[in-house]
Image (cartoon, grey):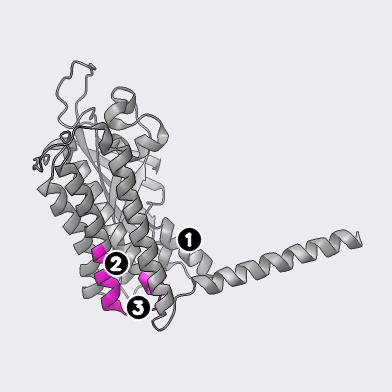
Amino acid sequence: MGIKHTIFACLITVTSFSQSKLNSFLEPNDTLNVSRRNAVVITEVSLASLTLLGLNQLWYADYEKSNFHTFDDNSEWMQMDKLGHVFSSYQLSRLGASTLNWSGANEKSQLIYGAGLGLGFLTAVEVFDGFSEEWGFSWGDMAANIVGTGLFVGQELLWREQRITLKYSFHRTQYALQNPDKLGDGLLEEFLKDYNGQTYWLSLNLHSFFKNSKIPKWLNVAFGYGAEGMVSGTNSLNEDFVFHSDPYRQYYLSLDVDLTRIKTKSHVLKTLFDVFNLVKVPFPTMEFNDKNGIKFHGIYF
């Protein structure tokens, strides 16, 4: 028993030391740490470049190249794809600013870098679309990208905090089986492609708007938007598949949790909360739509 106790004590000591080191590493600097800043910039620019190269080789290589052209897709997918662009640019901007904050950079630098990361990466993807015969450069997508970045930057300039957060939730649907090429084949692809199962949320932190109230600082109210019944962008009949669908819009009202406002001294937990705060926490939800009227979900994903 003595040996077991000794081994157990050693494991506890090593684990505590590792957690302490990780906690110290994740703690943001009060002043600019040039090494950290350079590491952030080099790492994220490298990852973004590798991602774009991967997209070019693994995604766009399957389609014919063309001269640069534009494409008006604003009427497709009941605008769910546009909300996807708003969400992506917002979260990329937030990620860029958050990681630069870790290096101790000032607020102005954080906003410039965050906005640059969000808009720069998604603009590059849009340019790829412009040279692909399958798609085209979409001004609607670019406008959505600007809205997402603007939502992040605007709140920082106005309130110096994110009182309104964009979030995402997903559940699997039957529609992907009817057109897996467009809506995804398997859970991972469906998570990214099946707009029928996606919901985008505006999550408002109540305490930040009512500072003197006793409302918990982490409690949010969330307004969601989704759509269902879509098997293609335009829902026109295609010779490759036959379907019967009646696309309709869905509006949601629910509660949510702002994980970043949960108090903790652990920088490990703070980092995890910051990462997972892009996902809407499941709660009982009211759905409003033109097809079924009002529908209640005990727990909605």
Task: Check disc 1 and report the residue beneath it.
Answer: 272
Please say if the residues under marks 3 and 2 sit with CB atoms less than 8 Å apart: no
Disc 3 element: loop
Magenta span of residues: 100-116
Instruction: Indicate whether residue 54 is drawn in magenta.
Output: no
- Please determine whether, in this image, residue 74 is positioned above or below residue 222: above
Disc 2 residue type (three-letter): Arg
Please say if the residues under marks 2 and 1 sit with CB atoms less than 8 Å apart: no
- The earlier-in-sequence mark between 1 and 3 is 3
The residue shown at (35%, 78%) is 105
The residue shown at (89%, 61%) is 3
Label 1 vs label 3: CA separation? 21 Å
Disc 1 residue type (three-letter): Leu
- In the image, taking residue 21 as reference, residue 297 lies left or right, namely left
Task: Check disc 3 and report the residue beneath it.
Answer: 105
Q: Nearer the viewer, mark 1 or mark 3?
A: 3
Q: Position of residue 58 (x, y in %)?
A: 33, 38
Q: From this viewpoint, is residue 215 visible?
A: no
Q: Within 10 angstroms of label 3, few (less than 14), some, or many (20 or more) residues?
A: many
Q: From this viewpoint, is residue 114 visible?
A: yes
- In the image, taking residue 127 as reference, residue 200 lies left or right, namely right
Which of the 4 image quarters holds residue 275? bottom left
Disc 3 residue type (three-letter): Ala
Task: Check disc 2 and report the residue beneath it.
Answer: 163
Residue lying farthest to the right in this orientation: 1
